[in-house]
Amino acid sequence: MLSFILGASVAAGLVPAALRAQDKFDFSPEQPGRIRAGTNPDAIKAIPQSFKFAEPGVLTVGISPGGPPLGAYATDTRTVVGADPDFAQLIADSLGLKLNLVAIAWADWPLGLTSGKYDAVISNVGVTEQRKEKFDFSTYRLGLHGFFVRTDSKIAAIKEPADAAGLRIILGPGTNQERILLEWNKQNVAAGLKPLELHYFDDEASRLLALASGRADVIVQPHAQLVFFAARDQNLKKVGTLSAGWPLKSDVAITTKKGNGLVDALTLATNTLIGNGKYRQSLARWGIEAEAVALSETNPPGLPRL
């Protein structure tokens, strides 16, 4: 049987993340190390003449600052910085436009995009078949979950269900990680292997404390988040990743209003950035090179309706 353990919140007293990771990541509003790109004439030509930007001469991008390293507030508590803002800047540069980042709540991005409040959303939006009915997508990152353990752990790698047999695994309830690991557990039990022992915790601090104290063996959640925690706390190491859409591929994409014609220019700009190395340099600033795509695709197959 699976073991379900609920953790209490222990968030009080944590040192701000920006201060604890400042030697690894730059959270200044100025972002002097941000990678920049030149204009891309082919991408500019691909913008339909009929397309009207929310603000002339500006690429207005909606982004939800949910946390580092993808998107978070800088030390001035106003400027949004991170891997997604960096990529948005590269796209704006490629199209010969200034960049205006609009901080939004995650739940608000569909309405804001369809109403024309912003031209694109670059905020860890995954491609799904349902979303493709209303939006166009240019992929720019792999959707990955990470398996991380304590730095002194003897666990070397987790690549498939059998590697996780019998392990005590930390995750959040009701998450995509739970869906995947419950299926892994079914496969392991059917194969006569030890079941997974899933430990559920309410909040981030509780999950990290449980791993650090040895109450569990592995923590599983979005890869980029764990990369940041590993750099900040210096007590975690990565032993594997898996697609957030397992067993299917799950890509993250620039999201635009369906049929407005901007998607082809964005895909072209992204592939040029991949080819000239700017794209990977930008991801490397935030430690998430593992999430790089080899090729940007326009409206690839997305996760099916549940």
Image (cartoon, grey):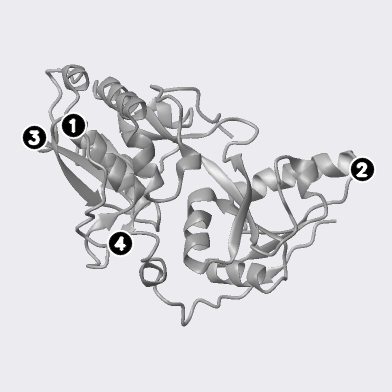
Counting from the top left corner in percent of width and height, residue 66 is at 39, 56
Q: CA distance from mark 2 to mark 1?
A: 56 Å
* Residue topped by disc 3: 57
Quadrant (top left, top right, bottom left, bottom right) of the C terminus: top right
Q: Is residue 124 left or right of residue 178?
A: left
Q: Nearer the viewer, residue 110 or 242?
A: 242
User: Which residue is painted at 26% across and 43% down in the image?
Assistant: 35
First in residue order: circle 1 vs circle 4: 4
Badge number at residue 192: 2
Q: Is residue 41 visible?
A: yes
Quadrant (top left, top right, bottom left, bottom right) of the N terminus: bottom right
Q: CA distance from mark 1 to mark 3?
A: 16 Å
Is 53 placed above or below 110 here? above
Q: Is residue 269 left or right of residue 127?
A: left
Q: CA distance from mark 1 to mark 4?
A: 24 Å
Counting from the top left corner in percent of width and height, residue 272 is at 30, 24
Q: CA distance from mark 2 to mark 3?
A: 61 Å
Is 306 placed above or below 197 here? above
Q: CA distance from mark 4 to mark 2?
A: 48 Å
Counting from the top left corner in percent of width and height, residue 227 is at 50, 54
Q: Is residue 134 visible?
A: no
Q: Amino acid at mark 1?
A: Gly
Badge number at residue 27: 4
User: Which residue is painted at 18% across and 31% down in the image?
Assistant: 38
Q: How many marks?
A: 4
Q: Secondary structure at mark 2?
A: loop
Q: CA distance from mark 3 to mark 4?
A: 27 Å
Badge number at residue 38: 1
Q: Amino acid at mark 2?
A: Gly
Q: Amino acid at mark 4?
A: Phe
